Structure formats: C-alpha cells, structure tokens
Amino acid sequence: MRDYLSYSGFRIWSECPWKYKLNYVEEIGGFTGNEFTAFGSAVHNTCENVLLEKITTKQAGLHFQQQFKKELEELDFEHDPKLALNMYIQGKRLAPLAVPALKEYFGECEIVSVEEDLYENIEGHDLKFKGFVDVVVKTPDGKHHVIDWKTCSWGWDARKKSDKLTTYQLTLYKYFYAKKHNIDPSMIETHFALLKRTANKNIVELFRVTSGKIKMNNAFKSFEKALYNIKSKMFVKNRLSCNGCEFYRTDHCP
C-alpha cells in the first residue's frame, strides 16, 4: 500500500472504493490516458513554460503543438487522427491566451510558484498528502492564490462549478499549502482556471472557489473517512459508478 493519499486517489475512492483498491493497492493498470488527457498535459506544460519564462506567449502555440505530438506518441493505443488534428488547431489558439488571462484576472501580482509539489504529513496518520499545485500568485494585499488549470470543452455549468468533490481538490491544496509554508489559511484563496478547447468566447475563465472553515471541515470529514477505510482495507464496490469504469465487467470486477 502506498505511503500517501493524493487528491486523485481520494476522488477515485469516493467514486468507488473497489476501483481504488484495483488502482492503488493491487496496482492493476486501468485507464492510461487518451487524446483528452494528452491535450490537457500539453496545455499544462505550455502554461508552466510561459510562467517560468522559458518561452514567450508568442511561442506558446507552437510549443503546445510540439508537446501534444509528444504526448500522443506516448499513448499505448492508436489515437484518432481526426480528433487529434482538431485538438492541434484548438490548442494552438488556446495556449497563448492562458497566462495573459491569469494576469489580467489578478492584476498586479507576483508569481510565487509553478507546479509546486506537496508532500505533507497528515496529522494523526502515518500517511502523507501528495499533490501538485499548478500556480500560486501573491497579490499586493498579501494574499496567496492557489490556481488549478482545468482543460475542458465548452466550460462548466453552475452544478459542476459547485460540485463538492471537485472543489475539495482546492480545499485540500489550500490546507496543505498553508501547512507547508506556515501561512494562515485565511490569507489563501483558491481558484479554477477553465481552458476551453471548443469555446468561441470567454475561452479562458477564472473563478474563485470558496474554501473557508466550514468547507475545509467538510472536506476533511470525507478525507478522514477515506483514510480510515483504506487503512482498514475496507473496499466496497459502488455499483452506481460502474458506467464508464475501465474495470467494469472484466476479470477484476465481474
């Protein structure tokens, strides 16, 4: 069993504890990526390089296409060439817009960290929390802002934007980022940045996600429940989440 629990692991456990067991305990290879994850990885890599000033905004489109090609080549199946071609075009248009939109959203700000790793002790447990924070900026009022890039097609509706499990990612990142740097959590705000692959307007949308004390307490109740059951090796199948699962009706989950 792994010595850490990441948000991804927590999310999988929340959807189906048995799926968590197959992925993280038995380490059976399930989903290994597709054109959409390749697109997301290429966009993330491009944003990272622009923020670190390794490339300019003008170079972002070409960098995305080169990185996307590399990501596609690493897939373990033959990708859809028509879909990939559309993604090449969409990513080239999207990639140069992300960082300027972030800077416009915050105005005057300092880039504090990019792709920062979190590997912090979980109080009361012999496990660590593992995560990667895409971007942290600091504004003149002294507040740190934790931002997570999310690639999508048209965007998110109100239900998706307020989905508990989705927003718990930023809540957990906020808590462990504050712990790592000894910062008062009230001085940290959290945001998603939607990078919309097929949208014609508002292609990059940033919005704040509430992550106060009540939200944090609720997130940790769910997180503690996951930790308890994982350590107790209690892995129950959630038949309501079978649709779309890569293990459904296989030898691993008949």
Image (cartoon, grey):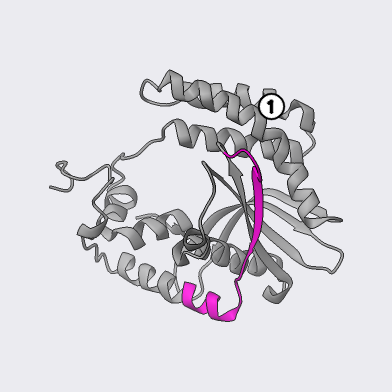
In the foreground, 124 or 189: 189
Q: Residue at x 53, y 33 (%)?
A: 39
- What span is colored magenta in the figure? 199-219
Lateral position of residue 172 relative to residue 15, left or right: right
Neighbor class of circle 1 (other Cα within 10 Å; few <14, some 14-19, many 20+) is: many
Asked whether 217 falls inside the magenta stretch, the response is yes
Residue 237, placed above or below residue 142: above
Q: Residue 31: where, in percent of width, then height?
A: 34, 39
- Residue drawn 36% across the image and 68% down it: 226
The residue at 75%/26% (across/down) is 59
Residue ID for mark 1: 61
Q: Quadrant of residue 215?
A: bottom right
Q: Is residue 55 visible?
A: no
Determine whether 206 is above or below 221 in the image. above
Answer left or right for 149 relative to 144: left
Judged left or right of residue 172, residue 191 is right
Instruction: Tell me the element at label 1.
Output: helix
> In front here: 103 or 234?
103
The quarter holding residue 108 reads: bottom right
Q: Position of residue 111 (x, y in %)?
A: 79, 51
Q: Is residue 183 above or below residue 21?
A: below
Is residue 147 in sight in this rendering?
yes
Q: Nearer the viewer, residue 53 or 163?
A: 163
Residue 91 inside the magenta-drawn segment: no
Q: Is residue 155 left or right of residue 35?
A: right
Which quadrant is home to the N terminus? bottom left
Residue 242 point in image, percent of width and height? 23, 51
Extreme front residue here? 200
Q: Position of residue 203 (x, y in %)?
A: 64, 42
Q: Residue at x 65, y 59 (%)?
A: 207
Amino acid residing under circle 1: Gly
